[in-house]
Amino acid sequence: MPENQVIFAKEFIEMNYERYPGQKWFPYYLSLYMNRTGEQEKALELLIPIAREKSSEFWAWQHVADCFGSGNEKRLACLCRAVRCHVKEEVFLINVRISLAEELLAAGQKEVAKHHLALVKALREKNGWPIKDRLEELINQSWFGEAEAASGEELIKDYARKADQILLEDLPRYEAVIGSPPFQIGKKNHTFSAVDYLNENNELKSTLANHHKFDLIRDLSVGDPLEIMVDDSGEKPMVIAVNQREGEKFDILPLMVGMVSHVNLDKSLSMVKLEDGNKAIMFHNEVPDSDKLIESTFVHCKIAQDRDRLKVRSFELTSDVGDSDYWKSFTGNFRAKDQGNGGHVDSLFIPGHLAAEISDGDFVRGMAVLRSGDNGRDWWCAVSISEIQKNDGNDSIEHNSNTPEVFVG
């Protein structure tokens, strides 16, 4: 592309990419043109977030390499990282290998440089393509005939690790824990785990870590302590590096008292009313034995902030929890509704599924939770009935014990 067209394209994208933040590739294309016009530092600033997201793609490392001049160790490192990326076809790496050979040659690694040029030469000959331009120049130089080709695999690996460090520059380190069992999402069914972490403001956050990128997570269990590096400059925080650290399971998560206020076995979830009045969701496939909990059970639970909701990560049974502003025990005589199911004890509502065995005037004992409606109105609602004394003078009925059989925190 002629220089005047490069300048025009750069200026056009520069004027528009901030106006259209939805165009996620504008910064990428702008960085390419900045490299062409000699603005490597600005280009690198734009490319780093893209390379962090696309660190498994060879082209991302190829373009980061272009931000460094020939003979710069960081350029060599990025090109080494590029050739270690998986590609559908080896032809995609032809230009990368030629550039890599030039940098290896400048670093005195003639044998490894010859290896990569020989791969390119063989690939072009296999496809019936001519040997020309920079490839032809390099293989016709005297050193190419004198050197003995060597893959230099360990050398390439060492430089590739240095390239990864480029993406970590200036990123903070956060204490974290594995928040969930592995699960698969996306068209490619990639495996992820939730990771909970404390940011620089000591705020609890949650994001996802890809098992394909971070082998360490595959070998750890839910709750295990981590140290992570996160890029939170985009719409969603992105895990860039993961290391194991010393600590206890779920050690950074707050421990709170809560009462199970609702169980939905059909949807495999439970709701927990917390001591501060908030509510947290507990998915049965994420928290062991949570499907055995019943309404009005008290628990000590570890809580994480997962996007716009609170989630229970683990729990242990607890007892001797007194009444609070958000739950309470109650007693009184049942007053059936004139129409429909359910009724009241004073102003406390008892829903129909709990009132099936209760008759008008019966004395009842149970647990209730404070609920809030969309209109801002609060009301007390029974979540369990532990005793019914029939109005006819017969013996009382012990409705349920509220003690599950099996619990594993």
Image (cartoon, rainbow, N blue to C red):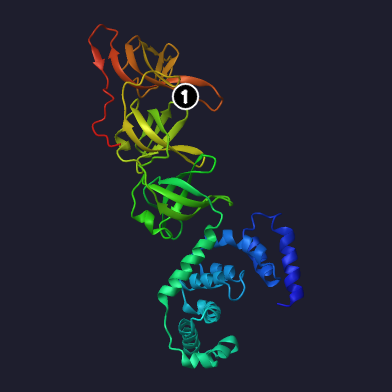
> Could you say where residue 116 lies in the image, as x and y percent from the top left?
48, 82
Residue farthest toward the front in the current orientation of the protein: 108
Q: Quadrant of the C terminus?
A: top left
Q: Is residue 117 above or below residue 377?
A: below
How packed mark 1 is, by other alpha carbons closer than 10 Å (few <14, some 14-19, many 20 or more), is some
Say which of 46 and 347 sits in front: 46
- Taking the image as shown, residue 32 lies to the left or right of residue 325, namely right
Q: Amino acid at mark 1?
A: Arg
Q: Quadrant of the N terminus?
A: bottom right
Say which of 299 and 69 sits in front: 69
> Which residue corresponds to the image point at 37% horizontal and 56% vertical from the top-left?
216
Residue 85 in view (yes/no): no
Residue 195 in view (yes/no): yes
> Could you say where residue 42 lies in the image, as x and y percent from the top left?
67, 62
> Could you say where residue 199 lies in the image, as x and y percent from the top left?
51, 43
Say which of 374 and 80 sits in front: 80
> Which residue corresponds to the image point at 66% horizontal and 67% vertical from the top-left?
40
> Which residue corresponds to the image point at 58% horizontal and 50% vertical from the top-left?
235
Q: Is residue 383 above or below residue 184?
A: above
Q: How many marks?
A: 1
Q: Is residue 172 above or below residue 375?
A: below
Question: Which SS class for mark 1?
Answer: strand
- Taking the image as shown, residue 366 lies to the left or right of residue 50, namely left
- Taking the image as shown, residue 359 lies to the left or right of residue 104, namely left
Q: Which residue is mark 1?
A: 371
Res 169 → quadrant: bottom right
> Could you say where residue 281 lies in the image, as x and y percent from the top left?
42, 36
- Taking the image as shown, residue 197 lies to the left or right of residue 360, namely right
Q: Is residue 246 above or below residue 10?
A: above
